[in-house]
Image (cartoon, rainbow, N blue to C red):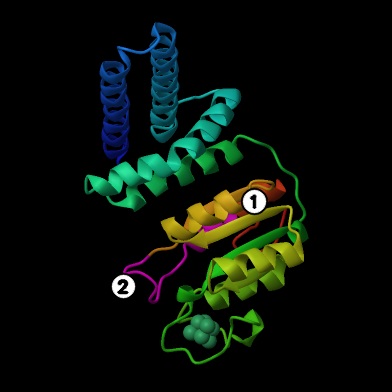
């Protein structure tokens, strides 16, 4: 569930800081050349207009209202530029960073879902965090997912069945460095990344040259322990990226 009010509050504070900063600068530069003050005011006003424009587009996307593809694309670029400032302000006023990260993942995913793709299964990589594996399981599945005995206690078994049925590449990444290495070695055309908000943002920002669809893992036991995946969300992402449909039996039609 995305709380867009927290995002708007953060943006409101960002705009207020910009206005306050400009007022202070104006007081201090009143003795300097008039043209300099004018330029600063025009620059800040332009930035504020861009931020407000981006917030309106973002609000509409979060509320699943229709937004044109080009506006979505421009907004994604603006949102990426604002990301660090927004995260900083949000955490300074006690808004959890994940609330903001969720918004950016939604902007990214909505933009990708407004494209059309026709990839083969082999062109796609699914990256899964290690915490999906049952904590008590002693099998070493990080280097070779096939080592899983498919006991059914975690999602890894289901993922292997998916891999066996459609031949999609699935890797378990123990961190961002390994995820980047997997991408560099396998050169996929698209990635379905399953992770928490923080890792998804970092992965999406790292791989700007290919579509990365983010899927949040569920964390009923807290972060990084016995998390799980909604396999249907992963299947929907595969269906979208391939333009095919995996049936519940894993067959395509
Ligand atoms: S499905 Fe069972 S065997 Fe496979 S990783 Fe999970 S707990 Fe281990």
Residue 154 position in % (x across, y down) = 47, 78
* Residue 203 visible in the picture: yes
Residue 209 position in % (x across, y down) = 69, 46
Furthest-bottom residue in view? 138
Residue at 72 percent of width and 63 percent of height: 184
Q: Secondary structure at mark 1?
A: helix
Q: Is residue 108 magenta?
A: no
Magenta stretch in the rendered image: 219-236
Count residues near mark 2 (Cα–Cα under 10 Å), then give few for <14, some for 14-19, many for 20+: few
Residue 64 position (above or below residue 252): above
Q: Secondary structure at mark 2?
A: loop
First in sequence, mark 2 or 1: give its number. 2
Q: Circle 2 sits on which residue?
A: 221
Q: Is residue 222 magenta?
A: yes
Q: Main secondary structure of the magenta part?
A: loop
Foreground label between 2 and 1: 2
Residue at 50 percent of width and 31 percent of height: 78
Residue at 38 percent of width and 29 percent of height: 59
Tell me where residue 51 sits by quadrant: top left
Furthest-front residue in view? 31
* Residue 213 visible in the picture: no
Relative horizontal placement of residue 186, taking residue 176 as reference (left or right)? right
Residue 16 position in % (x across, y down) = 26, 26
Total count of labels: 2
| Mark pair 2, 1: CA separation | 30 Å
Relative horizontal placement of residue 154, taking residue 185 as reference (left or right)? left
Q: Circle 1 sits on which residue?
A: 239
Tell me where residue 157 sits by quadrant: bottom right
User: Does label 1 point to a residue whose CB lies under 8 Å from ligand 1?
Assistant: no
């Amino acid at each position: 569930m995305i709380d867009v009010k927290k995002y708007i509050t953060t943006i409101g504070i960002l705009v207020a800081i910009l206005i306050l900063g400009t007022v202070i600068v104006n007081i201090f530069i009143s003795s300097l050349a008039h043209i300099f003050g004018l330029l600063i005011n025009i620059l800040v006003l332009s930035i504020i207009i861009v931020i407000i424009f981006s917030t309106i587009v973002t609000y509409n996307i979060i509320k699943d209202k229709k937004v044109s593809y080009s506006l979505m694309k421009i907004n994604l670029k603006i949102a990426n530029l604002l990301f660090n400032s927004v995260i900083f302000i949000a955490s300074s006023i006690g808004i959890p960073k994940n609330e903001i990260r969720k918004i950016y993942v939604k902007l990214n995913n909505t933009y990708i879902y407004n494209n059309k793709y026709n990839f083969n299964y082999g062109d796609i990589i699914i990256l899964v965090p290690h915490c999906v594996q049952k904590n008590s399981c002693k099998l070493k599945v990080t280097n070779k997912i096939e080592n899983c005995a498919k006991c059914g206690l975690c999602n890894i078994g289901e993922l292997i069945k998916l891999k066996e049925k459609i031949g999609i590449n699935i890797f378990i990444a123990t961190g961002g460095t390994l995820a980047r290495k997997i991408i560099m070695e396998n050169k996929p055309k698209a990635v379905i990344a399953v992770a928490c908000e923080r890792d998804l943002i970092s992965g999406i920002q790292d791989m700007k040259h290919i579509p990365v669809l983010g899927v949040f893992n569920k964390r009923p036991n807290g972060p990084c322990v016995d998390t799980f995946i909604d396999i249907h969300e992963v299947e929907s992402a595969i269906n979208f990226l391939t333009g095919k449909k995996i049936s519940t039996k894993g067959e395509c039609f």
